[in-house]
Image (tube, rainbow, N blue to C red):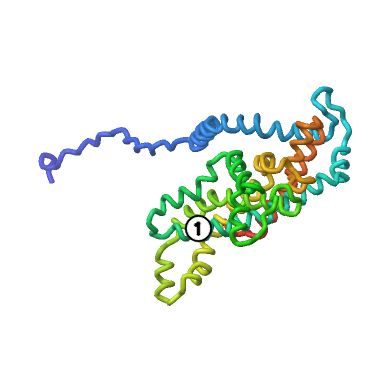
């Protein structure tokens, strides 16, 4: 091949290598998490400050004052566990503790059982069921003092509604709040009646989450109403039952208003509760150290009762 016909050599141009596109920069997760954490703490700071100022500090102060002799007028004087020894040897506080346990033992399960039955009934398509729910819940939002005044009239031995109703069927009336044998039971009746409303509302809310297909399947299998209640309704209400049980125990151990209005702790300390004994020690006898020790005992009772109820219903809130 001649030189004229030979193809001219091609000149290869050297181009700079094209840079590969860089991967998108991932956000710094640790930095974003720190920002979220700071924002979260910023939002909960007011609540934490409120709890610390109005709950944690008073609790710590109560524990500290329970180890002192303090009567408001003089500076607290350290006495160790003498207040607790006095409580242990005080028959009035032991009676108040027993009365509180009896009051709790009867008001809590009775009101819970009645509230559950009412909630199941009012969860049906009843006529005017909204009005029924309001009527049952009304005592819960009514001032306890006002309710106690109404029951004072009901229990009145001369003109009370209860004695008038009993006289119709030939049963003699009683001085319900002046008789040591009946006064505590009269107070228990008021407490159980007043506590039905809030428990009923919680149970109704829990019943709204029960799947109706469960009842339909049970109906196909021929289950009766009672069988449906024990096989479906009761198990599905266990988480709500645990919650109701805890708040009911706490509320029963803190009963004060109706005792103050109905009986003033009498007769013969037959209706004295732990909270009322704390009130008398602090604001009638001005023994703040002793009242603080009694409050610590009340807290211990509440803690034990809550743990017992949690143990009895463990796993129900899962």
Residue 29 appears left or right of 192:
left
Q: Residue at x 20, y 38 (%)?
A: 10
Above or below residue 205? Residue 17 is above
* Tally of marks: 1
Q: Which residue is mark 1?
A: 118
The kind of secondary structure element at disc 1 is: helix
31, 153: nearer the viewer: 153
Up the image or down, 79 lies above or below 253; here it is: above
Q: In the displayed structure, would residue 186 be above or below residue 8?
A: below
Asked if residue 46 shows in the view, the reply is yes
Residue toward you, 8 or 171: 171
Q: Which residue corresponds to the image point at 77% horizontal and 33% vertical from the top-left?
A: 282
Q: Is residue 75 left or right of residue 6?
A: right
Where residue 44 appears, x then y in whole percent? Answer: 55, 33
Q: Nearer the viewer, residue 214 or 142?
A: 142
> Residue 173: x, y in percent?
67, 55
Residue 84 position in % (x across, y down)? 85, 41
Q: Residue furthest left?
A: 5
């Amino acid at each position: 091949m001649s030189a004229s016909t030979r193809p001219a050599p091609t000149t290869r141009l050297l181009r700079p290598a094209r840079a590969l596109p860089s991967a998108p920069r991932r956000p710094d997760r640790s930095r974003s998490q720190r920002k979220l954490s700071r924002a979260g703490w910023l939002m909960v700071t007011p609540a934490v400050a409120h709890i610390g100022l109005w709950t944690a500090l008073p609790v710590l102060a109560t524990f500290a004052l329970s180890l002192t002799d303090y009567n408001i007028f003089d500076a607290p004087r350290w006495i160790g566990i003498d207040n607790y020894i006095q409580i242990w040897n005080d028959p009035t506080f032991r009676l108040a503790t027993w009365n509180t346990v009896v009051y709790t033992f009867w008001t809590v399960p009775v009101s819970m059982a009645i509230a559950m039955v009412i909630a199941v009934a009012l969860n049906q398509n009843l006529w005017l069921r909204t009005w029924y729910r309001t009527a049952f819940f009304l005592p819960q939002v009514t001032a306890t003092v006002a309710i106690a005044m109404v029951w004072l009239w009901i229990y009145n031995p001369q003109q009370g509604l209860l004695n008038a109703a009993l006289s119709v069927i030939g049963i003699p009336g009683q001085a319900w709040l002046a008789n040591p044998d009946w006064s505590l039971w009269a107070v228990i009746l008021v407490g159980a009646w007043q506590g039905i409303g809030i428990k009923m509302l919680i149970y109704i809310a829990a019943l709204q989450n029960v799947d109706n297909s469960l009842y339909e399947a049970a109906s196909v299998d021929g289950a009766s109403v009672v069988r449906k209640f024990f096989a479906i309704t009761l198990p599905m209400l266990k988480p709500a039952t645990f919650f109701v049980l805890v708040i009911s125990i706490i509320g029963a151990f803190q009963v004060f208003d109706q005792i103050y209005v109905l009986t003033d702790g009498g007769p013969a300390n037959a209706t004295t509760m732990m909270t009322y004994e704390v009130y008398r020690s602090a604001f009638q006898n001005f023994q703040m150290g002793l009242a603080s020790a009694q409050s610590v005992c009340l807290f211990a009772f509440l803690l034990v009762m809550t743990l017992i109820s949690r143990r009895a219903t463990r796993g129900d809130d899962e």
